[in-house]
Image (spheres, grey):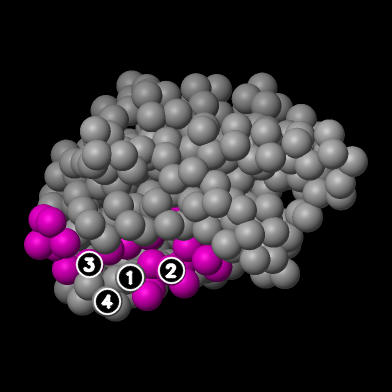
Amino acid sequence: MSRIIMGIESSCDETGVGLVRLAANGTVELLADEVASSVDQHARFGGVVPEVASRAHLEAMVPTVRRAFATAGLSMSAVDAVAVTAGPGLAGALLVGVSAAKAYAAALDVPLYGVNHLAGHIAVDTLQHGPLPEPCLALLVSGGHTQLLRVDDIAGKITEIGSTVDDAAGEAYDKVARLLDLPYPGGPPIDKAAREGDPNAIAFPRGMTGPRDAKFDFSFSGLKTAVARWVEAAQARGEEVPVPDVAASFQEAVADVLTAKAVRAATESGIGTLVISGGVAANSRLSGLAADRCAEAGIELRVPRPRLCTDNGAMIAALGAHVVAAGCAPSPLHLSANPALPV
Ligand code: KG4
Ligand code: ZN
């Protein structure tokens, strides 16, 4: 007997609703993945404004749920369980999704599962590449997070082995884009500009790679400051800032540190699979360098397609399906959002 799981995501600026089918043999099939983004409303502020995001979720939630059922050609009564992002994320934004999920679960009389957003970014890979080999290692790189996670059980046991001590990788992209007068969010325009530039033009620092630094932690704020100083110095000399070279050199520094640490972590712990997910996983240089270094080290690399890497409801539905399949206990209807939910 197969089961239909609805997933609701609202931790940041994307209202996501996903529907998946969990087959009796444990395979998970994507039926619908609808996203309404408020990113345009945040662009002029250069970052997500929590209050604006919460209001946008309120407006988008019900229409997005309806679109998901229409796309899947299902009626709501087909749903067997509702999964929702309980954290981490913005408190007000999370609460909109949690409240909606409770209402749907109660009205449809089906179990509710509050799940972790970060685990969702990893679970989404199973929609494209099938069951995850466990243990595996996950490099999660987004606007809010930069973490190396060891996954022993996607439905229950995930351990953080490294994280950023300051800015997230995506945040660094967004801040550097601002320095270069490129639009928000900064990842895609930097990725594009970098294609015309020389990645070795400027030797930007590789944070946290000294002998006394924590092995698997990351730091991007020094890199961001180095780019700012470099740009200021060029302007002070009256020179035009070579945007493609700065973008390519910055991007190279980020990709170098992320892939070097991830591959080293996998090699040292004897883990044969690396999953890279989150918005920054869409970066062409990051996936290219990771592919080269993983091939060299004999590690299988899995990178979900860009649409699955950014925030969406399918990742929460997929994780919900794995949690249901594992027989985990549902959450109580008084489930609350936890902005700082640990993985
Ligand atoms: O996962 P995501 O959609 O939302 C968060 O949970 O943060 O990630 C958004 C982040 C933004 O910082 C954006 O600049 C970055 O992902 N990003 C990229 C690329 N596409 C999106 N960074 C580098 N290269 C890209 N191609
Ligand atoms: Zn995310």
Mark 2 falls on what kind of element? helix
Q: Is 135 rendered above or below residue 179? A: below
Residue at mark 4: 296
Task: Give residue 137's mark.
Answer: none
Q: CA distance from mark 3 to mark 4?
A: 13 Å
* In front of the other: 119 or 230: 230
On whether residue 286 falls in the magenta region, the answer is yes
Q: Amino acid at mark 2?
A: Leu
Residue at mark 1: 293
Q: Amino acid at mark 3?
A: Thr
Mark 4 falls on what kind of element? helix
**Side of 265 relative to 233 (left or right):** left
Residue at mark 2: 289
Q: CA distance from mark 1 to mark 4?
A: 5 Å
Q: Image quarter for residue 234? A: top right
Residue 276 x %, y %: 38, 59
- Check if mark 2's residue and mark 1's residue have beta carbons within 8 Å: yes
Q: Earlier in the sequence, mark 3 or mark 4?
A: 3
Q: Earlier in the sequence, mark 3 or mark 1?
A: 3
Which residues lie in the magenta part?
267-292
Residue reaching furthest left?
Answer: 270
Residue 55 x %, y %: 68, 28
Task: Say if residue 24 shows up in the picture.
Answer: no
Q: CA distance from mark 2 to mark 3?
A: 16 Å
Q: Image quarter for residue 42? A: top right
Taking the spot 19% from the left edge, 49% from the top edge, the residue there is 150
- Check if mark 3's residue and mark 1's residue have beta carbons within 8 Å: no
**Side of 154 relative to 202 (left or right):** left
Q: CA distance from mark 3 to mark 1?
A: 12 Å
For the image, the number of numbered tags is 4
